Image (tube, grey):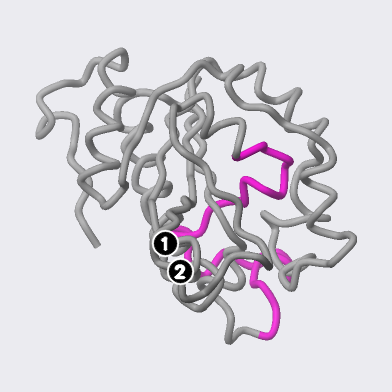
């Protein structure tokens, strides 16, 4: 695991400099790109959160605290955004076809790791309410062999608190709208995506909310 820079090692302890430092840190940790946006760049819609349950229930539904129905509702998440002013958004590009197979899990794990790193760095920079979020369910990514999530099992501590972060899809974040705002090309991944096609690029994203 790549160590986080401390405030002294980055040459600043000024919270105003912290958000910009996060972008460079994200890239150093493997992100293809990272941008800083106003909090209103996040479009949150109930219909996206509802997709976790229907019409085709996600295999991770109900298995982690960061996934529905345990995650905050889209309405609650929208209301909570009033407590933040910026969002640091990062992505990892990958061939769209590779995100239809087991490679998707490796990319998603990287997204969670980067989000967790950035959250801790933001706290060091003085962003005391920093909150990292990532693509995919932490249960599938880090505790697939466990019968049940430790947090959901009688409120035990998370087995991977330094890695696992809540799902951005679970609260209804519109990833395409976010990619458009960041200026990133966005390719949809669906049943028509050919697994042999390595030319079409897609992305997975993570973010850190900053007060």
Q: Check the picture and name the quadrant holding the N terminus.
A: bottom left
Q: Earlier in the sequence, mark 2 or mark 1?
A: 1
In the picture, the disc for residue 58 is none
Quickly name the residue at label 2: 197
Q: Secondary structure at mark 2?
A: loop
Task: Give the alpha-carbon distance from disc 2 to disc 1, as whole Å.
Answer: 8 Å
Q: Main secondary structure of the magenta part?
A: loop
Q: Secondary structure at mark 1?
A: strand
- Which quadrant would residue 52 be assigned to in this image? bottom right
- Front residue of this view, candidates 96 and 77: 96
- In the image, what residue occupies the spot 60% across and 40% down? 175
- Front residue of this view, candidates 126 and 100: 100
Q: Is residue 26 left or right of residue 96?
A: left
Q: Is residue 15 magenta?
A: no
Q: Residues within 10 Å of mark 2 (few under 14, many from 20)?
A: few
Up-down relation of residue 201 to residue 7 (above or below): below
Q: Is residue 18 left or right of residue 60?
A: left
Q: Is residue 142 left or right of residue 169?
A: left
Up-down relation of residue 119 to residue 85 (above or below): below
In the picture, the disc for residue 95 is 1
Up-down relation of residue 161 to residue 191 (above or below): above
- In the image, what residue occupies the spot 46% across and 38% down? 185
Q: Find residue 30 and report its horizontal and vertical position in percent.
A: 27, 52
- Front residue of this view, candidates 154 and 90: 90
- In the image, what residue occupies the spot 67% across and 54% down? 66
Q: Nearer the viewer, mark 2 or mark 1?
A: 2
Residue bounds of the magenta highlight: 147-175
Q: Residues within 10 Å of mark 1 (few under 14, many from 20)?
A: some
Q: Find residue 191 and report its horizontal and vertical position in percent.
A: 68, 68
The total number of labels drawn is 2
């Amino acid at each position: 695991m790549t160590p986080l820079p401390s405030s002294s090692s980055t040459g600043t302890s000024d919270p105003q400099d912290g958000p910009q430092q996060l972008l460079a840190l994200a890239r150093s940790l493997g992100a293809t790109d990272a941008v800083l946006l106003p909090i209103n760049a996040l479009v949150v819609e109930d219909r996206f959160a509802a997709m976790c349950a229907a019409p085709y229930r996600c295999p991770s539904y109900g298995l982690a605290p960061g996934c529905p129905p345990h995650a905050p509702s889209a309405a609650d998440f929208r209301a909570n955004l009033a407590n933040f002013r910026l969002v640091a958004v990062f992505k990892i590009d990958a061939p769209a076809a590779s995100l239809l197979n087991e490679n998707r899990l490796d990319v998603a794990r990287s997204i969670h790791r980067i989000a967790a790193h950035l959250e801790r760095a933001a706290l060091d920079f003085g962003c005391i309410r920093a909150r990292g979020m990532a693509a995919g369910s932490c249960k599938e990514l880090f505790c697939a062999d466990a019968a049940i999530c430790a947090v959901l099992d009688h409120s035990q501590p998370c087995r991977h608190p330094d890695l696992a972060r809540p799902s951005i899809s679970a609260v209804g974040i519109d990833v395409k709208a976010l990619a458009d705002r960041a200026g990133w090309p966005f390719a949809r991944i669906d049943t028509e995506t050919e697994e042999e096609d390595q030319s079409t690029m897609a992305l997975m994203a993570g973010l850190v909310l900053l007060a």
